[in-house]
Image (spheres, rainbow, N blue to C red):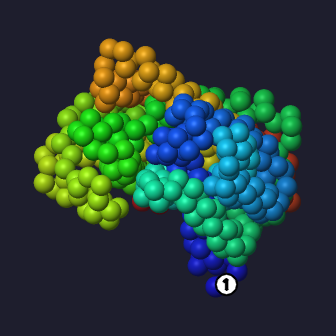
């Protein structure tokens, strides 16, 4: 495998995708096990849910420091250190002997997890060209969704009899991924930018660059939209609980209901795999108008709201062998998808809803790369991730309170359905903010393009001039990039 060649780059992207998925596995394994972990430690589900909420917040806050370090220094050792920390925290979580120990272990894991997504994003954005950002970033976003699904499934399947097992298995997978990462291509900063071809780009972020970042108005909307979007997405980590409650309402034992809830929640989130279509649509429309990616994301999240609301209220008739082994229960759930019309209707609704909202992710990633120079991307991503973390933590925590309050008027599982449905309306302000971003993105892209081109000319020994003098060339190149025939 030639160092820096096509195969080495492809291998590197795959490894980064795996790393990004594993950090979501580490978070996703906990919600299906709220009851089991709480029972073992003698605390309620809310106490374990608090660990997940704290994990969201700490990883989001820590990501800013990790991203800044990555944008300032060599990114590879930063990512390795962060990965080793979350592996240690996840291992400790699986070995914890009490609630306080478990909570501290989750805090340690969260601190390390903050490095994975933010620093990896900066590296991946340097590995792919602007024309294919939507497609490749859809795999990046998909990896995080798959990680959440894998965590949900691992929590239910590996943890339905022993909740500690999925934590230890996830930590072991993290060790393997770290070893694979040591062989990845150490991509130069700005390597994929056509404006920087042939020059040694060594720009670094500085502490006084934050006002510059926030003056790009598109960045403001891209950062803020995550607050409301992640309140809605954060509520969806309770999907296994909803399906578990439906199974218990139909008379199934707790052990079988936990497994049923995890498997159903996993199957119903398969629509996230269609984020690839959202990335492709963003790439295609972006060639016609600089507003393309933002408009695809705006339409996707707004159109998904009614389908989510329907999903939570469509009745399901679950028929699986109660008390049977794991394989038999999973087979029963899969049979239900084919034989039970109510389950099939729920699945179709969920897949379509998740397909629409999944258009958000790859286009968000791509726009951050489009409007920011290489040395700012990791930090902008982490700022967005910070707002995402608060939103997701808020959604996860608030929906739990909503379930309790609603239980007085609506018995389970109806209280879960009403609570989850109401939280999906937070997607509406998200869609509005993407529309606002579509109005500013063209100017911000042009300004960044012009600045990089001016720096490239100076590095080549050309006239210093000011950036504005390159405007005709910038316009010509942007037109060429937007032309589908180019």
Residue, x 67% and y 68% (percent of image)? Answer: 175
Judging depth in this view, the residue of 422 and 38 nearest the camera is 38
Q: Which residue is mark 1?
A: 2
Residue 337 visible in this rendered orientation of the protein: no
Residue occupying the far bottom of the picture: 1
Q: Is residue 34 left or right of residue 462?
A: left
Residue, x 33% and y 36% (percent of image)? Answer: 245
Residue 55 visible in this rendered orientation of the protein: yes
Q: Is residue 432 left or right of residue 477?
A: left
Count neighbours of disc 1 (C-alpha within 10 A) and say few if under 14, some if 14 to 19, many if 20 or more: few
Q: Is residue 212 left or right of residue 273?
A: right
* Image quadrant occupied by the N terminus: bottom right
Image position, residue 287 (x, y; %): 45, 50
Asked where in the image residue 393 lies, by quadrant, the reply is top right
Image position, residue 478 (x, y; %): 56, 48
Judging depth in this view, the residue of 415 and 429 nearest the camera is 415
Image position, residue 305 (x, y; %): 34, 30
Asked where in the image residue 300 lies, by quadrant, the reply is top left
SS under mark 1: loop
Residue, x 46% and y 32% (percent of image)? Answer: 235
Asked where in the image residue 4 lies, by quadrant, the reply is bottom right
Q: Is residue 243 above or below residue 462?
A: above
Q: Is residue 3 above or below residue 94?
A: below
Residue, x 27% and y 63% (percent of image)? Answer: 328
């Amino acid at each position: 495998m030639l160092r820096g060649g096509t195969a080495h780059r492809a291998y590197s992207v795959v490894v980064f995708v795996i790393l990004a998925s594993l950090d979501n596995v580490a978070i996703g394994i906990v919600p299906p096990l709220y009851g089991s972990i709480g029972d073992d430690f003698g605390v309620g589900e809310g106490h374990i849910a608090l660990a997940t909420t704290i994990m969201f917040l700490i990883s989001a806050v820590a990501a800013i420091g990790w991203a800044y370090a990555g944008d300032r220094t060599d990114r590879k050792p930063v990512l390795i250190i962060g990965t080793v920390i979350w592996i240690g925290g996840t291992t400790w979580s699986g070995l914890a002997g009490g609630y306080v120990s478990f909570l501290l272990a989750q805090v340690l894991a969260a601190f390390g997890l903050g490095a994975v997504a933010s620093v990896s994003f900066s590296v991946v954005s340097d590995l792919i060209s602007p024309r294919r950002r939507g497609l490749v970033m859809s795999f990046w976003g998909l990896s995080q969704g798959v990680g959440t699904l894998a965590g949900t499934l691992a929590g239910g399947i590996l943890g339905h009899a022993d909740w500690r097992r999925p934590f230890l298995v996830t930590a072991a997978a993290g060790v393997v991924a770290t070893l694979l990462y040591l062989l990845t291509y150490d991509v130069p900063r700005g390597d994929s930018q056509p404006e920087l071809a042939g020059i040694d780009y060594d720009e670094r972020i500085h502490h006084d660059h934050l006002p510059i970042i926030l003056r790009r108005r598109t960045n403001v909307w891209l950062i803020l939209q995550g607050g409301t979007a992640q309140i809605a997405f954060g509520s969806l980590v309770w999907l296994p609980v909803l399906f578990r409650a439906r199974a218990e309402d139909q008379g199934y034992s707790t052990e079988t209901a936990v497994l049923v809830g995890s498997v159903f929640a996993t199957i119903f989130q398969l629509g996230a795999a269609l984020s690839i279509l959202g990335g492709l649509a963003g790439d295609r429309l972006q060639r016609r108008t600089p507003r393309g990616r933002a408009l695809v994301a705006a339409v996707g999240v707004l159109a998904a709201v009614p389908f989510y609301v329907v999903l939570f209220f469509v009745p399901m008739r679950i028929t699986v062998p109660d008390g049977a082994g794991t394989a038999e229960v999973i087979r029963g759930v899969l049979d239900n998808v084919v034989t039970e019309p109510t389950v099939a209707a729920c699945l179709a609704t969920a897949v379509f809803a998740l397909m629409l909202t999944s258009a958000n992710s790859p286009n968000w990633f791509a726009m951050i790369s489009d409007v920011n120079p290489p040395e700012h991307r990791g930090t902008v991503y982490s700022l967005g991730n910070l707002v995402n973390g608060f939103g997701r933590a808020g959604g996860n925590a608030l929906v739990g309170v909503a379930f309790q309050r609603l239980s007085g008027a609506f018995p389970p599982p109806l209280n879960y359905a009403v609570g989850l449905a109401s939280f999906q309306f937070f997607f509406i302000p998200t869609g509005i903010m993407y529309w606002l971003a579509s109005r500013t993105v063209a100017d911000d892209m042009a300004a960044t393009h012009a600045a990089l081109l001016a720096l490239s000319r100076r590095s080549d020994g050309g006239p210093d001039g000011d950036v504005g003098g390159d405007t005709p060339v910038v316009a010509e190149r942007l037109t060429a990039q937007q032309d589908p025939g180019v």
